[in-house]
Image (cartoon, rainbow, N blue to C red):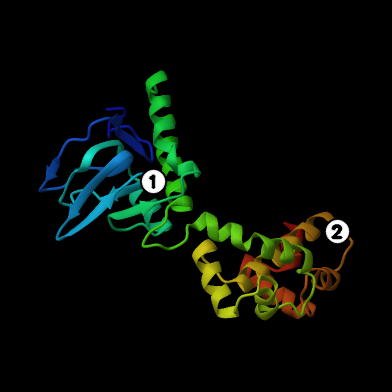
Amino acid sequence: MLTTPEQTIPFFIECIGFNPEQETVIRHEGYGYYHWLQTVSGQGEIFLGDRSYLLPPNHGILLMPHVAHRYHMHGDRWSTCYLTFDGPQVAPFLSILGIRVSTVYCWSADTELEKVIEQALESALVTHDVTGLDNSIAVYRFLVKLKRHGRTDGAPSIQSLAERLTPLLHYLDAEYRNPDLGTADMADHVRISPRHLNSLFKKAFGFTPYQYLLNLRIRKAKELLGSKRSMSVQQIAEMTGFRNSSNFIAAFRKHERITPDQYRQA
């Protein structure tokens, strides 16, 4: 037990540990906190309702509170590490990450996710965090790494998608001034169809590549509005890939809720 639920922090760790010989566990009413269980070596089997899942190395499961489950060793041995946590901001943050149900994850052996619980446990053993703030950071870090590196149902991880799209991001950073640049050009640059590109981009970043390009142009325009006080709105529109000042002002107002001139004055 590391942190009491009464502490007013966004995330708290209830308990964290390593179990070299994982015993059979049956919880008909589930567990009262969010529960992460991860295989270190060997293999386990976990049951949720009428479905079972194997947990070999580089696999883990995030169990929602009060979800009935049971798990046991599958084979000759099974060692695990675990983390149970909660807090007033856990549910909203998981919703933002798109994690809403108990889910089995896998990951590549060389990712940060492999060691994140071990590192958090080592930190807990050598520090006495009476405020709970370090533990709160540890939970946040774990959830971010789970979202970034974890894979579900054979789908690629967010990190692998981002790495695949990095050449396109560099291309857009160099070519955003071109007003004729569109989704078809972006798709050609990475040699996939526009539909596939839209799908990959949404999975990785939550929006389309054209929305990313528009956001990039607005950000570059804001930099110029602040640093080039003598430059006209028309000039900034031309330098950031907008066809004319009218399109620029309309897009800027929609994105920032004020006009470029109002932004510059502010």
Residue appearing at x 76%, y 80% in the figure? 180
Q: Secondary structure at mark 2?
A: loop
Q: Position of residue 179 (x, y in %)?
A: 77, 77
* Label 2 vs 1, first from the N-terminus: 1
Horizontal side, residue 149 vs residue 264: left or right: left
Residue appearing at x 52%, y 68% in the figure? 202
Depth order, front residue of 97/217: 97
Q: Position of residue 83 (x, y in %)?
A: 31, 37
Q: So how many labels did they put on this image?
A: 2
The three-letter code of the residue at mark 2 reads Arg
Depth order, front residue of 3/264: 3
Mark pair 2, 1: CA separation: 54 Å
Horizontal side, residue 111 vs residue 117: left or right: right
Depth order, front residue of 34/36: 36
Residue appearing at x 29%, y 40% in the figure? 42
Horizontal side, residue 13 vs residue 192: left or right: left
Q: Is residue 133 visible?
A: no
Q: Quadrant of the C terminus?
A: bottom right
Q: Quadrant of the N terminus?
A: top left
Is 157 drawn above or below residue 252 in the view shown? Answer: above
Q: Is residue 240 visible?
A: yes
Is 114 drawn above or below residue 123 in the view shown? Answer: below
- Crowd tier of the residue under label 2, counting other residues whose Cα lies within 10 Å: few below 14, some 14–19, many 20 or above: few
* Residue ID for mark 1: 58
Residue 104 picture quarter: bottom left
Horizontal side, residue 65 vs residue 132: left or right: left
Residue 99 picture quarter: bottom left
Q: Position of residue 166 (x, y in %)?
A: 65, 59
* Residue ID for mark 2: 229
